[in-house]
Amino acid sequence: MKKTTVCLFSTLILGMSVLTGCSQNAISGDSQKDGSNVITIVAQTAGAEKTRVDNLVKASEKLNEELKAEGKNVQVKVETKDFEGSWDDYAKQFMLAFKAKKEPDIYATGHENIGWLADGHYIQPLDEMKNSKAYSDVFPTLWNSVTYKGKTWGVLQDTEVRPVFYNKDILKKMGWTDQQINDLPEKVKKGEFTLDDMTKLAEEAKAKGFVQYGIVHRPVDGPDFQALAYDFGDKLYDSAENKIVFDKKAVAKQLNYYYDIAQKKLIPDQLTSMEWKNVHKLVVNGKTLFYYGGIWNVFNWSQDNYHDQLGKVDANWVNQHLGMMLIPAADKGGKPVTLSHPFVYTVSSQTKHPDLVKRLLELVADPKLQVDHDVKTYHLPVTKSAAEDPEFKGNVTLGHASYMLDYTTFLPNLEKFPKYSKDVFNAIQAVELGKQNPDAALKDLEVQLKNDLGDQLEIVE
Amino acid sequence: MSTLLRKWQLPFLMLGPFIILISLFFFLPVVLITVLAFTGMDSSMQWAFNGLSNFKHFINDPNIWHILRNTFTYVFFTLLINVFFGLVLGILTTYFIQKESVGLLFRTLWMLPRITPPVVYVLLWLWFFDPSQYGVLNSIRALMHLSPVKWLASNPMTAIILANGLIGASYGMIIFSSAIKSIPGDLFQAARVDGASQWAIIKDIIIPAVRWPLMFVTLWQLLSLLTSYEYILLLTKGGPLYSSEVLALYSYHKAFQNFEYGYGSALALVLVVVALIMSAILLKIFGMNKLMGSSRIE
């Protein structure tokens, strides 16, 4: 019996140690040759724009100099992590890592995630950062994107705009002069060229056989669809009530728009089942007149071989063949829109070194570091001093797009907003696939939203 | 007392680790899911008990009837292929192909998808159904100057039933083959002497002899299919829209994509209950006692 007990006990111990094997937290303190303590700060981002965390490494060099000058026996080492996978998986990984106390100290994410991160007590408020010198010249409107329930939950890393790209070569084939082509963004700005005009132009290009498709948009759920909602007058979020607004009239117009362009065969069949790379290929190979894109797509097109003959195409090529304009206003004389989706640095509520992390975040706002990231990845800076940098201003793409920030909008930060976005995307998919007409889709969407969002939904008839 | 201990010592030693593993990985998750199903756990991962809210949510979910109908279609037709195709393969490779080595070769070939990682297996199907002119089906259409068809987007349910059905058939094939092999050869000889046709042999000798394995495979595959979703996730992600979404996948999507862990668990609990009810009904119909009894042949 003794043997049995020993066997059983060792099996248990072995099993438990396998299960809990790696649950010990990494030791963050270490000592260097010169006797100073090394504190490791982990920063994580997702996607191809690695400068988001690499800049933190550069900022740590300056921080270490400062610490040395202050005579402190501490040095900071930034350990970077990048995530490749879907945004859902990126969020899920953070949740689970947090519960296992293995989360990064600095978690870079889209600003719309602040709602659930704050509600789940995953991150800490950073109100004092708003008053710090480093962030004193942030474009004021951008602070709205990190404000939730009256507190500031992150510092801004970068922002962008989502223009409509138009193909200059196709317009030329349609008989447009260079002057007309270059004036198009200005006409959109003034509300002289509307969404209807855009649809008609796309129809004409398709009818004349210059393009395979008139309009292409992103194939998966994302902020662009909500930019259209704003264009139709939706306000999406009631900050006083902290509720998502379901404006039925505006959403009906939003659904009608997608139904209309699908019925007119201006978009590819099953666009919402297409792969991203095929969407990019359609755009750079001139198979569509318009594309609802993002300014960072210029970076994407230079990273992969999307062009059939040229492979990768650089910003100069893009500027030569594609133009950028705001999303045209829904009505003549109306205000066009775009949407920004600032990327932000959030700080874990469990971090052991909140002061050092905050100092690091102040240093990473350095205009030079921002501009380095922005010109490499085609994003826009968050501070005025960085926007004034000659290198940024001289950039052929970025220089042409920064005016769009005056027309920009943001997604609400509310915890349940991703669900709202998914439900609306499903309705758009239903009308584009012709499975439902806009009326039926709107009716079903209302039921779905009531079920999914409960008391966080405010319905405007 | 010590005699009793001695008697149970070895079985306990042998089974102990497995009992621990089963408790940890099978029993505990069911308990966890049951508890979670009564909470509103979301992205904040807090245990907020909310009574029957998730089940009310389930009944009012506008997608749920569509998803239940999909689940029924998927399970029913995949099971049909699993069982009947498995039986056909079993008969073909053991009765019609008398040479053992040839039969074994065919059975091994059919086992290949099962030992292939799901991602690789699904990649082959994705290539087969590819919407461009380079897909297998579309290149055949191209030979006849027909334009490419978006197979997966227009027939997602057919695709997932075929992909799951064919891989599942190998399981039935193995069980049925061994059952057919256990039929004494003189039964076949006597039938042939009496002038029985091949169909009569299959109908009157083989099928009655594999009745129990047939029922076992049906029950086993039914329960597996109810909870399986990995091939659907890899092939169509449940789309387009909800056209190939089944309850198990919906539960996964709710829990791990929408972070509605509570609701996702409630959906999983519904599946567990459905599976238990189906098992009880089928065991009753099939007669488990007889199934466990000794073979009728011999």
Image: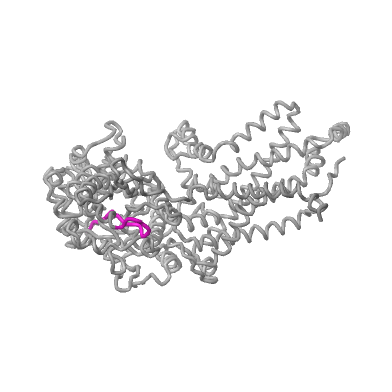
Seen from the viewer's position, the closer of residues A209 and A151 is: A151
The outermost residue toward the front is: A35
Percent from the top left, x then y, of residue B195? 86, 33
Near-viewer residue (A46 or A419): A46
Q: Look at the image and say whether residue A348 sits in the magenta stretch.
A: yes
For the point 29% across and 70% down, the residue is A239
Report x, y in % for residue B297: 85, 41
> Which residue appears at 63% of the width and 60% of the height?
B274
Q: Would residue A363 be found to the left or right of residue A245 on screen?
A: left
User: Residue A193: percent from the left, percent from the top?
Assistant: 18, 55
Asked whether residue A200 is in view, the answer is: no
- x%, y% of residue A33? 30, 40
Image color mode: one colour
Drawn side of residue B69 relative to residue A157, left or right: right
**Does B22 appear above or below A282?**
below
In the foreground, A343 or A429: A343
Magenta residue check for A166: no
Q: Along the horizontal axis of the image, is A236 left or right of B73?
A: left
Please tell me in which quadrant of the rendered image residue B150 appears: top left
Quick one: quadrant of the C terminus of chain A? Answer: bottom left
For the record, the magenta segment spans: A337-354
Q: Does the image show residue B269?
A: yes
Q: How many marks?
A: 0
- Relative placement, left or right, of A272 versus A322 is right
